[in-house]
Amino acid sequence: MGKRNFSQEELAAALASMGVTDQTDVSRYGSGHINDTFKVETARGETFILQRVNTDIFPPETLKANILRVTSHLKSKGIKSLEVVGYENPWRLYAFLKGCKSIDVVSKPEEAYLAAKAFANFQNDLADLPSPRLGDIIPKFHDTVDRLRQLDEAAAKDVKGRKALVEKELAFVDARRNEASKIVSMLSSGEIPERITHNDTKINNVMFAEDGSMVVIDLDTTMPGSALYDFGDMVRTSTAAAAEDEKDLSKVYSKKDYFESLVKGYLEGAKFLTDAEKKLLAFSGRLITLTIGIRFLTDYLAGDVYFRTAYEDHNLVRCHTQFKMVESMEAQAAEYEEIVRKYSL
Ligand code: GN1
Ligand code: MG
């Protein structure tokens, strides 16, 4: 899906519905693939993040309820988080996090360490969220078996006639189908616990503040899940030597020193993990990366209807980087397992 255009009138009406009428500039912001995000400057000198929630993907009322509960719980504990200034579905307004920056690719091990610790703390801080259970924003979000079903369906429909172009990619997936059910089935049997997890722990969803603190952002998929989904998605993005849509695959691989920093940071923060979870940390990186690759491939076959794309083969390029990352992690599997063991003691 390409970028949708918004008229200044539409943006002004959204802002006015949340009490902001003195905006001096509203411009596109960030690199998210789903929602539409804008930075808003005002005459009174305040800055906001305006977002239009993609309601084809998110159930708006459940999402709003989850976000309000999660942010107010974190606030009540004095934890720096997103601050909701206004929320009028499908629009919402967050205070701009001044002095914070985000990155799309890790460039030193320390960044992986800090990000992992921040996401571990986030899980920890939400462990005592009062009941009821948070709404399942997108059911089966990281369920690889269900993602395979969706891939098979898209390949069978082949709406754009692209299937013939991706025989190699489909074979790559077929060779790994037997691993797909491992985490979901352990979750449903209770061998690993359900926790409140972020579910989109890519490196640009955590902000680095000037004072050295970290703020976890993009709370839209925060819902019941497995800690392994969160750790796996960190491995996918925080150990990557190149961007998610790098075309030169020789630049794409998983960096062992970043992986080590990630494990160290995560295990320092996630004291709650069970042995069964720890044993699957290295595997989760491979599985979640494969799963996101499957989702990009599915969207390519379905005609680019889900992730925002900037050019014709964007989703296929993203699929290739994910599969290259999987291969790189597979090649280093024994070393990655050893690193996890070293820090699990
Ligand atoms: C999407 O919204 P954004 O860009 O942070 C997606 C994630 C994917 C990610 C891949 C709700 O995240 O699941 O891992 O793209 N979010 C949703 O970059 O599908
Ligand atoms: Mg995001």
Image (cartoon, rainbow, N blue to C red):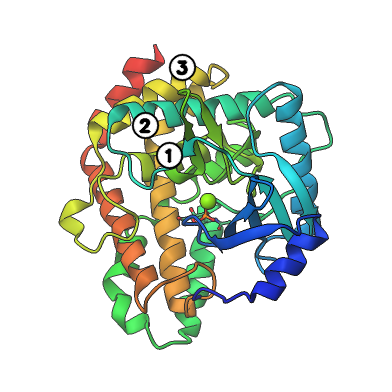
Question: Which numbered mark, 3 or 2, is in the foreground of this view?
Answer: 2
Which residue position holds label 3? 268
Q: Is residue 35 visible?
A: no
- Does the CB distance between marks 1 and 2 fall below 8 Å? yes
Q: Is residue 144 left or right of residue 132?
A: left
Q: Residue at x 27, y 32 (%)?
A: 108
Q: Which mark is residue 112?
A: 2
Locate residue 31, reporting x and y percent. Answer: 46, 57
Q: Please name the amino acid that badge 3 sits on.
A: Glu
Q: Secondary structure at mark 2?
A: helix
Give the left or right position of residue 246, taking residue 196 as reference. left
Q: Position of residue 66 (x, y in %)?
A: 75, 44
Question: Residue 234, which numbered label?
Answer: 1
* Secondary structure of residue under mark 3: helix
Question: Can you name the residue that lies furthest to the top here?
Answer: 345
The residue furthest front is: 43
Query: How would you rate the neighbour count of disc 1 (Cα within 10 Å): few for under 14, some for 14-19, many for 20 or more?
Result: many
* Distance from Cα at disc 3 to Cα at disc 2: 13 Å
- Nearer to us in this view, 340 or 15: 15
For label 2, being within 8 Å of ligand 1 is answered no
The answer to which of marks 3 and 2 sits earlier in the sequence is 2
Which residue appears at 31% of the width and 75% of the height?
A: 166
Residue type marked 2: Ala
**The C terminus sits in image quarter:** top left
Residue 175, image x and y in percent?
32, 59
